[in-house]
Image (tube, rainbow, N blue to C red):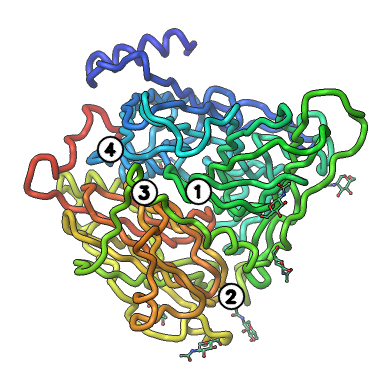
Amino acid sequence: MNISVFYFLAFLLCGMFIECDSWPVSNYNFVVREAPFRRLCKAKKILTVNGEFPGPTLYVHRGDTIYVNIYNQGKDNITIHWHGVKQPRNPWSDGPEYITQCPIQPGKVQVQKVIFSTEEGTLWWHAHSDWSRATVHGAIVVYPKLGTSYPFAQPYQEVPIILGEWWKTDVRKVLKEALLKGGNPRTSDAFTINGQPGDLYNCSKRGTFKLNVEHDRTYLLRVVNAAMNHILFIAISRHNLTAVGADGSYIKPFTKEYMVIGPGQALDCLLHANQELGRYYMAASAYSTGVHVEFDKTTTTAILQYSGSYPKNVAPLLPYLPSFTNTTAAFDVLGQFRSLASQDHPIFPPTNYLRTKLLFVISINAFPCLNNLCQGPNGTKLAASMNNISFAYPNVDLLQAYYYKTSEALLGESIPSNPTVVYNYTADYQDLSSELTRKGTSVKFLEYNSDVEIVFQGTSLVAGMDHPMHLHGYSFYVVGWGFGNFDTEKDPPAYNLVDPPLLNTVVVPKDGWTAVRFRADNPGVWFLHCHIERHQTWGMDTALIVMDGNQDEAKMLPPPPYMPPC
Ligand SMILES: *[C@@H]1O[C@H](CO)[C@@H](O)[C@H](O)[C@H]1NC(C)=O
Ligand SMILES: *[C@@H]1O[C@H](CO)[C@@H](O)[C@H](O)[C@H]1NC(C)=O
Ligand SMILES: *[C@@H]1O[C@H](CO)[C@@H](O)[C@H](O)[C@H]1NC(C)=O
Ligand SMILES: *[C@@H]1O[C@H](CO)[C@@H](O)[C@H](O)[C@H]1NC(C)=O
Ligand SMILES: *[C@@H]1O[C@H](CO)[C@@H](O)[C@H](O)[C@H]1NC(C)=O
Ligand SMILES: *[C@@H]1O[C@H](CO)[C@@H](O)[C@H](O)[C@H]1NC(C)=O
Ligand SMILES: *[C@@H]1O[C@H](CO)[C@@H](O)[C@H](O)[C@H]1NC(C)=O
Ligand SMILES: [Cu+2]
């Protein structure tokens, strides 16, 4: 189908099924289709939106509502998720497959109404079906409301910097092979900056992303980590970065020579082009702490180049990046985030009298495997869990099961509020039998407007590592974190309730814990999961079902006229 026919269909759909007040002003058309891309000396077809990699950047203002017409011209099931967009009362457009919707099957169209509310800064969108988000993703820029401005001087220019991960092999094959063999998926062959691996890889020099700057100007880099399985360090040689926003809310500025960003996170950084005219590398490489866990050890680069005259044949300098396993270096950044907590940007962290306190133990696990033939440790099959339940995707979506009360059995299993077995989660030695877990489609019901605390507790089972935990439908205040086991007596008194950062994805440190709080004021079914893709695949997931309140404004919106069927 050509694009004009598609527009026409989308228009019809819009006219028939949804309010079209804002159409076509803030309407976007996403055509999901395969397109050929050449990277690392090898061409392959990848799934894209509109043939672009990374996909198109969406530009909105705070509080906007947009419609996105998604037309699946590919061969795979697909869904699109608006990462960090809270979508008040509207889980219908959230996107994770088999959680809030059934996938859009090849040849089918879905119109998603995306409701922005209090987000301001950088967010992103990505596919939320199998591993298609590897190439199906893009940035979302949320400007302040007209008539208001940034809490920092207007930058001269703004540039999305999207970090990605590239396999020479088809990513569908990578997933399939990993599931079949039960081990770690093969590591990626490259990281990318705005779709390009950069000079340090073979056949990549020509496409290297260039950031052109004028001397003495300030640039706002809207950095998104869209990589699948890696937390990344990023830096620009001789230049500092000043973080001013994270996950669509502002933070107190802090300046470092490198930044760290977990998959799923977005970081707004100011860059002052104050160095000698010349060319400088921007570089990113992995932060990975799992003992004996393979990871991609390559470095992706882009080039910051000043305008003006200077010898252009001098090789740019590489910046300092901390070593792969340097947790101190990583948390020097990740532990620095603070909300503005000012009159213009107030915060509302739940303080006392929490209705619901949850302790979710997040772990890597292992299933026994017939004849020990799997590729996990000692022939086991790798898994992951939350409170020892390894999430199993249903084959109809949880939201419809909940809303229409159809498959109520599906929602029968509640994830326990606390681990059923208490052990030394972060001990150096773990009994092998505690690595086992079991499968289940577990959910947690929450009362409307209840104040909720979730403590994520990491473990050293199989291989402890950092986990970027992401909650849909909400941003949460990160009130505390630490190493070792969470202590219910000693740790809460040290919480930061003054200026905790408001994030949608938080990196829980290896062998440590993180406490987050939020008010459950957004009714719906909201996925909660690790944003390291393989951990999500293995089951480090659950869904929070926030029930309707009594008032009409406290209830989920009715479903749109068309949702893809299963
Ligand atoms: C580049 O190609 C050479 C020769 O094929 C190979 O040995 C080397 O590992 C490649 N480098 C990278 C970064 O892929
Ligand atoms: C970068 O920041 C450090 C301290 O945060 C400072 O000492 C250094 O001069 C800064 N470098 C540049 C190029 O601004
Ligand atoms: C970790 O990184 C920090 C900050 O860059 C550095 O000071 C420290 O020496 C590094 N530690 C190791 C073990 O490399
Ligand atoms: C694998 O087996 C060896 C030898 O039996 C044991 O020492 C080790 O702890 C096992 N590792 C895991 C992760 O099961
Ligand atoms: C848990 O294990 C860690 C690491 O081995 C150890 O330092 C700590 O003392 C243990 N805690 C308890 C309560 O046994
Ligand atoms: C987790 O569940 C499995 C299967 O029911 C069980 O064998 C294992 O002991 C449990 N582990 C913990 C730490 O509760
Ligand atoms: C695509 O989605 C439909 C509806 O849920 C499902 O029946 C089908 O198995 C899916 N196809 C693949 C290849 O996963
Ligand atoms: Cu994880």
Q: Nearer the viewer, residue 462 or 150?
A: 150
Which numbered circle lies on residue 92? 4
Quarter occupied by residue 17? top left
Rounded to the nearest angstrom, the CA distance separating label 4 from label 3 is 33 Å
Which of disc 1 and disc 2 is earlier in sequence? 1
For disc 2, the marked residue is 371
User: Residue 143 at what x, y percent from top left?
Assistant: 43, 30
Is residue 357 left or right of 62 when viewed as pictured?
left
Nearer the observer, disc 1 or disc 4? 1
Of tags 2 and 3, the one toward the viewer is 3
| Category of crowding for the residue at label 4, using alpha-carbon neighbours closer than 10 angstroms: few (below 14), some (14–19), many (at least 20) | many
Mark in front: 3 vs 1 = 3
Question: With 291 as the anchor, is 496 left or right in this view?
Answer: left
The quadrant holding residue 182 is bottom right
Which amino acid, mark 2? Answer: Asn
Tell me the distance, in whole angstroms, between the alpha carbons under discs 2 and 1. 37 Å
Q: Which residue is mark 3?
A: 342
